[in-house]
Image: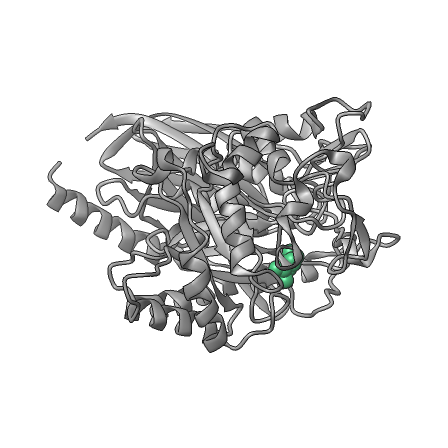
Amino acid sequence: MSTHWRHMLFATLSCLVGASAAAGADRTVTVLLDRAHPGARIDRNIFGQFAEHLGTGIYGGVWLGSNSSIPNVRGIRSDVVAALRALKVPNVRWPGGCFADEYHWRDGIGPADQRRRRVNANWGGAIEPNTFGTHEYFDFLEQIGSEAYVSINVGSGTVQEAADWLEYMTADTRTSLGRERAANGHPQPFKVRFLGIGNESWGCGGSMTPEHYVEELKIFSRYPRNYNLAQADTEPMQRIAVGADDSKNEYIEAVMKAWHERVWSWDIQGVSLHSYTADHFPAQHPSVQFGTTEYARMLKLTLRMDDLIAQDAAIMDRYDPAKKLALAIDEWGIWLAPLAGTNPGFLVQQNSLRDALLASLNLNIFVRHAERVRMANIAQMANVLQAMIMTDEGRMVLTPTYHVFRMYVPFQDAASIPVRIDAGTYVEGAVSLPRLDAIAAVDAAGVTWLALTNLDPDHSARIDVMITGLSARSADAETLTGAHVDAVNSFAAPSTVAPRTLRAEARGGSVALELPPKSVSVVQIRGENR
Ligand code: AHR
């Protein structure tokens, strides 16, 4: 079929989708995928993680020390490594967060028993033993097969300290710092793929005016140099500046303007947005024992992410129409009230089926903005905020959010394709939400992938998937759901919310399936081009 006719078919079928929107929850919903018009590549780095020295995010969640009786490799817990490997984590942002602007890298190198112990003033006044430092971080990345996103200390450090850290990590052994790294066990330079220049410099990172930050940015983007020649040509380090604080855009405006007017001697490759799903700080919404009113309210709140990205993208487009710079949403997720009995400074919350749906909605939004959003880091990887993994001594449990990240792996680096879906709305009291949400992509092998979120907690949705340019021959699907919107996985019942196979049938070139209420599903579709 010619491109013209495919386009006509998609347009005609789109009208049918619109026309059926008024029908009730029990009708079959048509989902149209347009393989003929692939969109932007979905950068795998939008599936990044964030691991801060906060609560048990590192100590307990990742690091045990090699004397631990819990299985580990060089002090890094093996169960967590195995779980993260399955997510194909593209990058891990470290060491913070607010912690990064008080982190001094020399505290975390050399013999473990001689490392400086400090108070973690940001997070609960815990003692920071610095036993997890630069070498342990890169060992962890190697074990899980990921890349480094290092945040340098702009708030309380000097540019010289940051420059020395970069030299220590990336220079070869002809230099003194390279030799010191080799003496500490790693002769080869480390690869620093991403460099965060400060963190929330509008807040915990120094409360700087945008103008002040921009002056710091010019200096910190120039002098901390990456000397790793092996990565220079093919994978040069990407520097990410501090950008928007939720809907406050002064920073991103100032940074983009400065970048637009820059002289040759400095540059950046991205600017950040931090936005949490919370309508109040300190967070008050419960992470356990809530009902559909609370469920709908938080899902509604999270959809703001789309507006925030659109606002930032519009600012970036004014200064960078060629989209050279990435928007990096390097802190996102739901931020809920601390669990009873935990240190409030450790940000421990449960992770429910609702949070899994919320993760899928955000990932879908990032995908729809894939041209500009090329990095994102959920907060945080283990035991903190919307975590993938919870640990307690030797026990580990995978959260519902973990399962969404695992189910979405096929979308990493795939080409997004347009989706038309109109399933009407799900109304809960005063809150109105789209009943279904979806993204689709084609991977390098030509396989079509479709992710579908059914927000309606009470009704399943019958789906008919039609694909322009492809006659479906087979379909395989899995779905994540649970008995209640607040269902969680616990150490005692770790598989309460776990993916299971979903029946999907290819017939007459299209695919039919039924999405359970309150679910996230991913469908793999193979077929013949037409
Ligand atoms: O993720 C927890 C904290 O939230 C981070 O340290 C900080 O950057 C943000 O305010």
Is 471 situated left or right of 305 in this image?
left
Question: Is any atom of residue 351 visible in this view?
Answer: yes
The foreground one among 324 and 290 is 324
The foreground one among 374 and 195 is 195
The foreground one among 216 and 149 is 216
Q: Is residue 251 above or below residue 235?
A: below
Q: Position of residue 85 (x, y in %)?
A: 56, 28
Q: Is residue 138 above or below residue 40?
A: above
Is 182 situated left or right of 56 in this image?
left
Q: Position of residue 66 (x, y in %)?
A: 75, 25
Ligand 1 quadrant assignment: bottom right
Quarter of the figure with residue 528? top left
Colouring of the image: one colour
Is 149 situated left or right of 333 in this image?
left
Number of numbered labels in the structure image: 0
The foreground one among 12 and 520 is 520
Q: Position of residue 50 (x, y in %)?
A: 59, 47
Is 409 situated left or right of 157 in this image?
left
Quarter of the figure with the N terminus: top left
Question: Is any atom of residue 303 visible in this view?
Answer: no
Q: Position of residue 233 (x, y in %)?
A: 30, 38
Quarter of the figure with the C terminus: top left
Q: Image point 20% across, 46% down: which residue? A: 9
Q: Image point 63% across, 45% down: which residue? A: 51
Q: Image point 63% across, 43% down: which residue? A: 381
Q: Image point 40% across, 38% down: which residue? A: 228
Residue located farthest toward the right when viewing the structure as drawn:
341
